[in-house]
Image: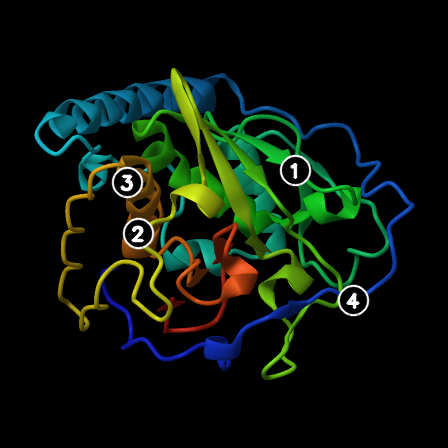
Amino acid sequence: MGSRATARPFLGLPLLVLIIAGTACSMPACGGTQGESAVGARESAVGARESESESASESSASASASASGLPDFRAVAPAPGPTGRAIAELEPARCRAVLRELDIPFDRSTDERARGIVPAPVVPTGPVNGIALEFEGRRALHRVMDCRLLVAIHAWAPILRAAGVTRIRHLSAFRPGARVRSTGEASGHSKGLAFDPRFFEREGAEPIDVLEDWQPRDRGAPPCGEQPEDGEEWPPLPPPAEGEENGAILRGMVCEAIRRDLFQVVVTPHHNDAHANHVHVEVVPGVDWSWNG
């Protein structure tokens, strides 16, 4: 993850259970303004060159998978734009400018329940760096994300594409009033800074389902191996057991996001039953630590 402080537990996460407050949503989440303008010709040309570089990197990662049968996620070039902890520190106006510069399609949310709670509430309106985002739930409000979460997903996208992923089906993002039961602290969902991917759809292959494919899932085991000390590298993941190849790909995608510090809190099925069917990934501004479990 580069330079970061030694990790410490996040707000009592060993007992993490998120509480969803509020009544059923009957209002539209975000009528939204018209989609923000696309980047100009100069930015588009730069983006095209960067996209070509990313594609070459992803092809290289896929080609190097022949020995292990898995993509070499560490060989994937980073996406253009902010990465790591720099994403979490973006101010709202600058964050929206980054979305436009990176040609990430979005509308601003006009839902009153997000205003004043989510610093920069947006709703994705198309694929994010080649990855479609599909909300699986019923309350449209839960599609709303803080702008910084959308930038983090953009940075994660090259890793996902290296595994052939074209679409994420997630369970929720913004949930007003969501709290960590063990501490009473507001969760990342309450500010639109977290979302819960469950299904990863892939081109030419069966979807990966967190509920079925995250194996093994021993309770309390570190999802990516023991977290290294500052300045040290994460250990490589072990080769998958027979029949657990999809799980190894899933774990590899998540652990590479952790290694690159795209999300400061990541909760997996190793943690508790509440996370048996999804991975909780969260951007946390203003901290020098990270947590995963």
Judge left or right: residue 29 versus residue 285. right
Q: Which residue is mark 1?
A: 135
Residue 269 screen position, x and y as percent: 44, 58
Q: Which residue is mark 3?
A: 244
Q: Residue furthest left?
A: 67
Among the two numbered marks 4 and 2 on one chain, the one whose residue lies closer to the N terminus: 4
Amino acid type, mark 4:
Ala
Amino acid type, mark 1:
Phe
Q: Residue furthest front?
A: 242
Proximity of marks 4 and 2: CB atoms separated by less than 8 Å: no
Among the two numbered marks 4 and 1 on one chain, the one whose residue lies closer to the N terminus: 4
Q: CA distance from mark 1 to mark 2?
A: 23 Å
Residue 256 screen position, x and y as percent: 29, 48
Amino acid type, mark 3:
Glu
Among the two numbered marks 3 and 2 on one chain, the one whose residue lies closer to the N terminus: 3
Neighbours of disc 2 within 10 Å: few (<14), some (14-19), many (20+) = many
Instruction: Name the residue located 77 percent from the left edge and 28 percent from the top edge.
Output: 34
Q: Which residue is mark 2?
A: 255
Q: CA distance from mark 4 to mark 1?
A: 19 Å
Judge left or right: residue 21 versus residue 15. right
Q: CA distance from mark 4 to mark 3?
A: 37 Å
Q: Which residue is mark 4?
A: 21
Neighbours of disc 1 within 10 Å: few (<14), some (14-19), many (20+) = some
Mark identifier at residue 158: none
